[in-house]
Image (spheres, coloured by chain):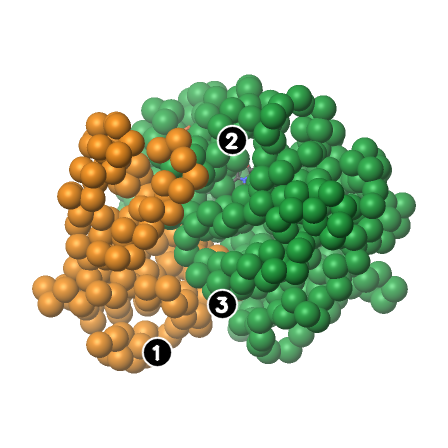
Amino acid sequence: MGDVSFLERLHNLQDTYGYIPEKEIVSLAEEYDVPKAKIFGVISFYSMLYTEPTGKFIVRVCDSLSCYLNESDDLVRAVKDYLGIGHGETTEDKRFTLEVVECLGYCGEGPVMMINDKVYTYVSEKKALNILSNCL
Amino acid sequence: MEEKILLKEGIDIDLKGRGGDTPPAEPNINEYDFFVLEEALNLDREEIIEQIKEAYLKGRGGAGFPTGLKWEMALAEEAEQKYMICNADEAETGTFKDRYLLENVPFKVLEGIIIGAYAIGAEQAYIYMRGEYARPRNVFSKAIEEAYKQGLLGEDILGSGFNLELRLIKGAGAYICGEETALLNSIEGKRGRSRTKPPYPIQKGLFDQPTAVNNVETLASCREIIRIGAKEYKSLGTKESRGTKLVCLSGDIWKPGVYEVEFGQVTIKEIVEEYGGGTRDDAQLKFIIPGGASTSILPAEKLDIPYCYETLAQAGSSVGSGAIIVVDDSHNLFDLMVTVSRFFMDETCGTCFPCKEGNRQVNHILNKVADKGGFSKEEVEIVKSIGRTIYLSARCGLGQTSLNFIYSILKNYPDEVLLGGDKHGKD
Ligand SMILES: Cc1cc2nc3c(=O)[nH]c(=O)nc-3n(C[C@H](O)[C@H](O)[C@H](O)COP(=O)(O)O)c2cc1C
Ligand code: SF4
Ligand code: FES
C-alpha cells in the first residue's frame, strides 16, 4: 500500500502458504494502518493471489483466441473431465486447482497450459493427461 | 526450431525473428558488448532525445505515441525524483514479442531501459512483468543482478556519473495492469485500476512524480536507434511508420512466431503467406486481426496492403501490439465472438460501469446468439448501443476497444451472422 514492496510481500506470502491467510492480512492491515478490507480488496483484484488454499498444482489452461483457434476448447474439456472439476474449482484431494484463463503469452505455440510456474506448449489432450498424471 | 531471419539483406536491426521457440540457452552477460550504452552515456540527454525524435519512433505497446516527444516532456518536468518504467505486462491476446525480447536479448532491453532513464533524468527504474512470465522473469532478474555486479546499474554507471536503480516488479494476473496508469497503481501496491487522464504519467505518474512508461520493444528499438543512428533508422519504413516492427503470428497458420518486418515493405498478405506459410490444411483464409484482439478484423480480400500504421488506419484497424491472428474459414463466427467477448468481460477492471456491465451483457447476448445461430436486427442494435455507451464512458483503451472485434465481424459478414429474415434489413 503506497509502497513498491507491497505486491512483492503479497507474492511472498502466496508462495509461502499457497494462499494469503487471514492472520497475515490482519497483520498487514495493522502494519500499514489500513482497514483489513482494503488489503483484502487488493488481493482479490489479482487473479494470481488467493485468500483460500488452492490445490498443490494450479493448472491454468488458456482459452483465448489464438489458442482457441488451435482447439483449446478440446483441451479444456479433456482437463476438466480428467480432473473432474470445473473452472475455479479444486479437487477433493487438494492436488489440483483448475483455471481456464486468458492469453498466457505463448500464442504461437498453442494450446498452452501452465502448471504452477511451468509452461507447456503444443499441448494435445494426450500430452495434457500425461503431464497431469505425473503431478504428484 | 529453425530460425527465421526475415530482414532483407543489408538491413540488420538485430531484433531477429524466430518462430515458436523456447530459447536454447540463457544469454550470457560476458558475451555481450554494452558499447551502445557506453556511447549513449557519453551523449547529452538532449542529444539522445533528439535522435529518438528524429527517428520518429512510435511506442510499440499499442498506442503509438511518439517516444522522443514523451522523453522530451519527461525531461522538461522539474521534480526531485523521476521514474522510468518498462512495461513488460504483455497480455493482449496474440502478443508474445516482448517475451521473445526478454528471453533472447535481455541485455538490449536493459540497455534501452538505462538509456531511457538517463535521457529523462530518472534515477529509479522499474520493469513490470506479468506474473505468468516465469522464465522471462528468471532470465531478466539474472540480467539485472549481473548488471549490478558489472557496474551497469547502481552508482556511476560505466564511470559516467549517472546513477540508476532498477527493480523488477512481478505482476499478479490482471490484463488491465498493462494500461500505464493501472500499472502505476499496481506498482504502488494498490488495485490495478486505471486513473483518469490528465494528469498523464509524464506529469504525475508513480507516487505522483514524472514518469515515462515505455514498452519493452520500444526501449529495445531505442537502443537500436542509438546504435545505427536516427538517420539510418528513419530511412527504414514509411513516412508515418519508421523502422521495423516485431510481428507475432498466431492462429490458423503453419509457421507461427515472432518476425521482424520493415514497415511498408511487405504486405499483410505476404506476412501471412510467406513468413507464416499460409493457412493450414485445406482451409481458406477468412480474415486476420492485425494488432491483437482489441483491433478490428481485416477480411482476406483486403490484405494486399503494405504493413504500416497508415494503411492499417485507412483500412479501419490498427497496428496495435503487432499481434497478427490468422483465422481460416473452418470456424463458427459466433464461437469466435463469444471467445473474444469473454476476454473483455474477464479483464475489465470494473471502474467504469458501462465497461463492466456492457461487456457482460454483450457476452450474454453473444452466447444466446451463438445458440440460435444468428443475430436478430434488434440484437445488433442493442450490441451497437452498448458499444457506443462503453466507448463514450470508458476511461481507458480496454473499454474503448472492447467491441472492435465484434463490430468488425458484424460489418464484414452481415449475411453470415444475421438471422435469415433480418439479413437485408441491416444498415
Ligand atoms: C488495457 C490495456 C492494456 C495494455 N497493455 C499493455 C502491455 O501489456 N504492454 C505495453 O507495453 N503497453 C500496454 N498498453 C499500453 C500502455 O498503456 C502504454 O501506452 C504503453 O506502455 C506506452 O509505451 P509505448 O509508448 O512505448 O508503447 C495497454 C493499454 C491498455 C489500454
Ligand atoms: S474502460 Fe474498462 S478497463 Fe478501462 S478503466 Fe474503465 S472499466 Fe476499467
Ligand atoms: S492465446 Fe493462448 S497463450 Fe495467447
Disc on res. A127: 1
Is residue B264 something one can see in this rendering?
Answer: no
Q: Position of residue B213 (x, y in %)?
A: 59, 37
| Distance in Å between CA atoms under marks 3 and 1 | 14 Å
> Which residue is located at x 81 percent, y 33 percent?
B46
Q: Is mark 3 within 8 Å of ligand 3?
A: yes
Chain of the residue where label 1 is placed in the rendered structure:
A
Q: Which three-letter amino acid code belongs to the residue tagged 1? A: Lys
Q: Which three-letter amino acid code belongs to the residue tagged 3? A: Glu
In the rendered image, which residue does mark 3 sit on?
A: A109
Image quarter where ligand 2 lies: top left
Kindly report which numbered mark, 2 or 3, lies closer to the viewer in this rendering. 2
Q: Secondary structure at mark 1?
A: helix
Tag count: 3
In the rendered image, which residue does mark 2 sit on?
A: B206
Q: Secondary structure at mark 3?
A: helix
Is mark 2 in CB contact (under 8 Å) with mark 1?
no
Which chain's colour is orange? A
In this orientation, which residue lies closer to the viewer: B92 or B174? B174
Q: Position of residue B209 (x, y in %)?
A: 56, 26
Chain of the residue where label 2 is placed in the rendered structure:
B
User: Marks 2 and 3: same chain?
Assistant: no
Where is B242 relative to B300, above or below?
A: above
Which chain's colour is green? B
